[in-house]
Amino acid sequence: MSMKTYALEAISVLVVEDNRFMRSILVNVIKGLGVTHVVEARDGQEALEELRNTAADIIVMDWELEGMAGSKLLQTVRSGKRGLNPLTPVIVVSANTIARNVLQARDTGMTEFLAKPVSAAAIYARIVSIIEHPRRFVRTGSYFGPDRRRRFEPGYLGPKRRADDRSMDDATDIDVKKQA
């Protein structure tokens, strides 16, 4: 089965990475995939300034940024404050892939996770996942972001394996397609 290919020149990507060398790699890989509008930010503050000036279709960000932590940047984006689009897909990139960090990124509202070192194929796969399988957004008392369940199954009666599934019962679905 061959993978469908996409022309990505129409999308814009914000790359947030404090390591100059890694930022250069990410930018060059993303441009190599055909994305023509790639904006760079060295830290969270610079990323917020860029997002206020130009909307990004996708944010690719390091989780362990100097200054403003990746978690704070992601929380700020998901808050929708300061004119930010809280529905922007966010690909978190990190060399620190211990479960605690991945779960923290998930629970803060990331869309996809990518372990360093990155490859062009892995970045492309995450972008394709965002295009082909947009995730519903949910809001609970303590969370706003992509639904962690990758499949929406109305009337699901199976086991609830997550401790916070009780709050998901009261979640408000946000229709991403209507927001776009």
Image: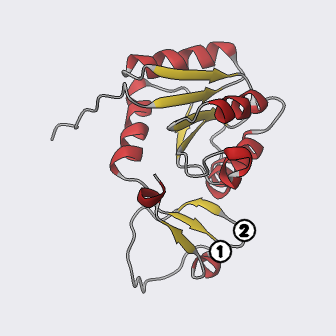
Give the residue displayed 48% in from the left and 22% down from the top: 37
Q: Is disc 2 surrounded by few (<14), some (14 to 19) or many (20+) residues within 10 Å? A: few
Callout 2, which amino acid?
Ser
Residue 151 visible here: yes
Residue 135 visible here: no
Mark linked to residue 164: 1
Secondary structure of residue under mark 2: loop
State whether residue 54 is above or below residue 136.
Answer: above
Q: Is residue 153 left or right of residue 149?
A: left
State whether residue 178 is above or below residue 180.
Answer: below
Instruction: State the separation of the CA atoms marked 1 and 2.
Output: 10 Å
| Residue 169 drawn at (x, y percent) | 57, 82
Callout 1, which amino acid?
Asp
| Residue 112 drawn at (x, y percent) | 51, 46
Q: On the image, numbered disc 2 is attached to which residue?
A: 142
Q: Is residue 152 left or right of residue 171?
A: left
| Residue 90 drawn at (x, y percent) | 56, 43
Q: Is residue 31 left or right of residue 20?
A: left
Which is more N-terminal, label 2 or label 1? 2
Q: Quadrant of the N terminus?
A: top left
- What colour scheme governs how the chains and residues are painted in the rendered image of this protein? secondary structure
Which of these two is toward me, 115 or 74? Answer: 74
Give the residue displayed 61% in from the left and 19% down from the top: 23
Secondary structure of residue under mark 1: loop
Give the residue displayed 65% in from the left and 30% down from the top: 53
The quarter of the picture where residue 120 lies is top left
| Residue 141 drawn at (x, y percent) | 71, 73
Q: Nearer the viewer, mark 1 or mark 2?
A: 2
The quarter of the picture where residue 70 lies is top right
- Whether tag 1 and tag 2 are in contact, CB under 8 A, the answer is yes
Q: Determine the residue located farthest toward the right in the rendered image.
A: 67
Give the residue displayed 37% in from the left and 45% down from the top: 131
